[in-house]
Image: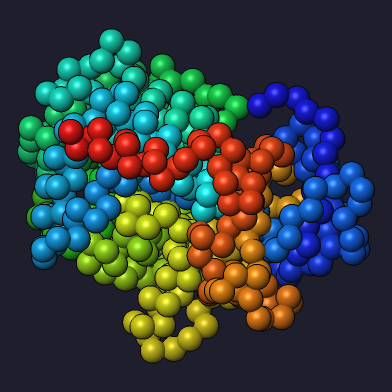
Amino acid sequence: MPTQRTRTYWLEHAWLGTHAEPGVALDVRDGRIAAVRTGVPTPPPEAEPLRGLTIPGLANAHSHAFHRALRGTVQVGSGTFWTWREVMYATAGRLTPETYHALARAVYAEMALAGITSVGEFHYVHHAPGGSPYADPNAMGEALIEAAAEAGIRITLLDACYLSAGFGQPPDRHQLRFSDGTAEAWAERCSLLKERDHARIGAAVHSVRAVPAPELATVARWAGERRAPLHVHLSEQTAENDACLKAHGCTPTRLLADHGVLGPRTTGVHNTHLTEEDIALLGGSRTGTCMCPTTERDLADGIGPAVALQRAGSPLSLGSDSHAVIDLLEEARAMELNERLRTRTRGHWTAAALLHAASEAGHAALGWEEAGNLRTGALADFTTIALDTVRTAGPQPRLAAETAVFAASAADVRHTVVGGRHVVRDGVHALVPDVPSALAGAVRALRG
């Protein structure tokens, strides 16, 4: 991102990690926060006022951008995760680098409108249909990286190793374009990807059913040598647990632990159907947990043991996954509200804890440790939520965080700033002029 002069934003209310502080001036230089000045009751002459509650930019720690094309379509009829997956595979089969770029650009613009400043793209559609590599073997990943740049947000491309249809089974016809054949070939292709100012490269084990046990260490080693984030779909479905037990005599979590996949740079996505030993393994290794509540309920996956995981030592982050909706505020409150339904008690997480999961912890899970805080030296990535809409008007300003988490939606986001520059101003995307039209056109092109 280009060098810029110092500019000042005046925040009517600023979330400083523990409380909403009224009257804060942020000085921004070269894409970072140069100073945080409290006790500024009115906007200084040189400042741009941001009215509402300004919070650190939200981090969407788990995304499959092309799933956005399924919205609405998969709500017809009944079924399970496995029937939904067939519709998803059909959509994946129609992607090209060009159509994926157009769709992802629109999806990432929708994220910016929702206050998201960083996305973790769990990317596994690597090759052409049938499995032949493109002339540029990373054409699909490069399309996603460019899409994020054009939408004005940061991306961690979590390039996923995906080698099999199940334990001991070769990829099926849908999955051929996901597979590099071996983990070594996957690592060779991933090594060609280059980081940029807005983009970092991470790794992913799609799942224990998709990466044979002898290949897991190769993926873990590749990520470890680069100190890169490593994500994995973990125990989203009981069928996966049953198949792993049959094939290896242990749970997926134990299998990952035995092959060196767990650790503080690793994040398990979903972590839904776990044993007590699984929870202890994840927490004891400081492996993170990315909960995706709107997808987990949309696919009827179940409610994961987020409270127990956090108590055991697993940091919590949030993702919108299949993009049934793109709203990190909804993801945050859904984690709490799901737990209330499960336990019939209230107050498992404070608004502060949920904002931490949606911002600072999510950025850390994606390798952007310098984001997720309104503090000197942090990346100048933040978003402002209106406090005067039909959803947010009324509560006292000191309860601004509670109002935002438990009542606001993505529609209440007024401004999104990334690297000190407006991506969204007054609810309008600065780089993608008509996001709804871009989404409609991209989905229409993909459906043919």
- Pinpoint residue 273: horizontal percent, then vertical percent: 26, 65
What residue appears at the point 60 percent right and 70 percent down from the top-left corner? 389
- Assign the C terminus to one quadrant of the image: top left
What residue appears at the point 34 percent right and 82 percent down from the top-left corner? 342
- Pinpoint residue 364: horizontal percent, then vertical percent: 56, 47
Q: Image height check: is 385 above or below 144? A: below
Residue 59 visible, this orientation = no
- Assign the N terminus to one quadrant of the image: top right
Q: Image height check: is 345 above or below 2? A: below
Query: Quadrant of residue 202 in the image?
Result: top left
Left or right of 26, for residue 190: left
* Residue most extreme to the top: 135
What residue appears at the point 25 percent right and 33 percent down from the top-left corner? 445
Left or right of 168, for residue 325: right
- Which of 27 and 432 lies nearest the eye of the viewer? 432
- Which of 390 and 239 lies nearest the eye of the viewer? 390
What residue appears at the point 27 percent right and 44 percent down from the top-left corner? 69
- Pinpoint residue 335: horizontal percent, then vertical percent: 43, 70
